[in-house]
Image (cartoon, rainbow, N blue to C red):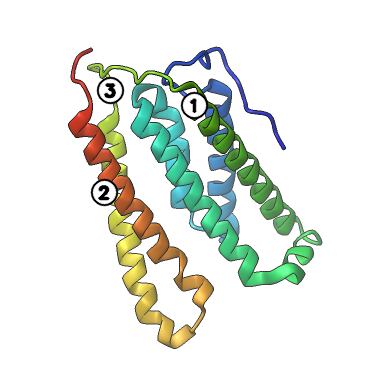
Amino acid sequence: MPPIPRGANSSGDDVTPVKLRRLAIVTGCFVAISGVLLMWTDPIPSCLLVLSAAIQPRSPRPGRWLMWVSALSVTVFAAVVIFADGVAGLSGLTTTIPGAVILVALAAELWCDVALVLEAARRMRNHPAEAPRSRRNLDWVVWTAAVVMTGYYSWASAHNIRMYSSYGRLANLLPWPALTVVMLLFDVALLIHAAKRPRTE
């Protein structure tokens, strides 16, 4: 199990450690690029993982939540690839260069997921104080991403439900409604956070 990436800013404030944010950025870039070139996964969640890790210091809590949601989305799509191809398909990936790239991307995403979970557990133990809002705050970027992704997942859910009768692949259908529910809960959490957040600098 990988250790929690630590950085100079991991002393209990509301900013995710810099090494963990760098890991998320590298992982997101690698998964997004390989997803586009090899067409093995939806690159949008990985791009959001990169965005959320980049802006998290200026959107501490919503930005961290977006990191979690984006990483979860990437993992769900990776799981679809695994379950759709099965063990035989995964073993076959090692025989080709594109397949090896996909395996490396899956391993990087797993590492990032474990690191994010460990960091979340550390925060639950330490209860760091939330950083006050500043004029350079980028919460609006997170809100925009949340609205766009909720609409995208909702549309994809409706489309895949309509196509299910033709293709009948449950593994391709289930992730979209599940992620739509996750995004709706994320939207609610952002609204509650915005209502309760102090406006002082």
Does residue 87 appear to the left or right of 12 in the view shown? right
Q: Residue shown at 35%/58% (left/top)? A: 181
Does residue 33 appear to the left or right of 146 in the view shown? right
Residue tagged 2 = 147
Question: Looking at numbered disc 3 in the image, what kind of residue is underneath it?
Answer: Asn
Quadrant of the image for the C terminus?
top left
Percent coordinates x, y for residue 75 in the rendering: 55, 52
Q: Which mark is residue 137?
A: 3
Task: Give neighbour class at mark 1: few <14, some 14-19, many 20+ (Cα, 10 Å).
Answer: some
Q: Residue shown at 60%/58% (left/top)? A: 38
**Sequence-earlier tag: 3 or 2:** 3
Q: Secondary structure at mark 3?
A: loop
- The extreme right residue here reads 95
- In this view, the residue in front, 32 or 65, is 65
Q: Residue shown at 63%/28% (left/top)? A: 4
Percent coordinates x, y for residue 187 in the rendering: 27, 46
Please identify, in this view, whether the residue under mark 3 or under mark 1 is nearer the observer: 1
Quadrant of the image for the N terminus?
top right
Real-space CA distance between mark 3 and mark 2, rounded to the nearest whole angstrom: 18 Å
Q: Which mark is residue 156?
A: none
Q: Secondary structure at mark 1?
A: helix
Marks 3,2: beta carbons within 8 A: no
Residue tagged 1 = 123
Does residue 42 appear to the left or right of 163 in the view shown? right
Real-space CA distance between mark 3 and mark 1, rounded to the nearest whole angstrom: 21 Å
Q: Is residue 181 above or below residue 115?
A: below
Marks 3,1: beta carbons within 8 A: no
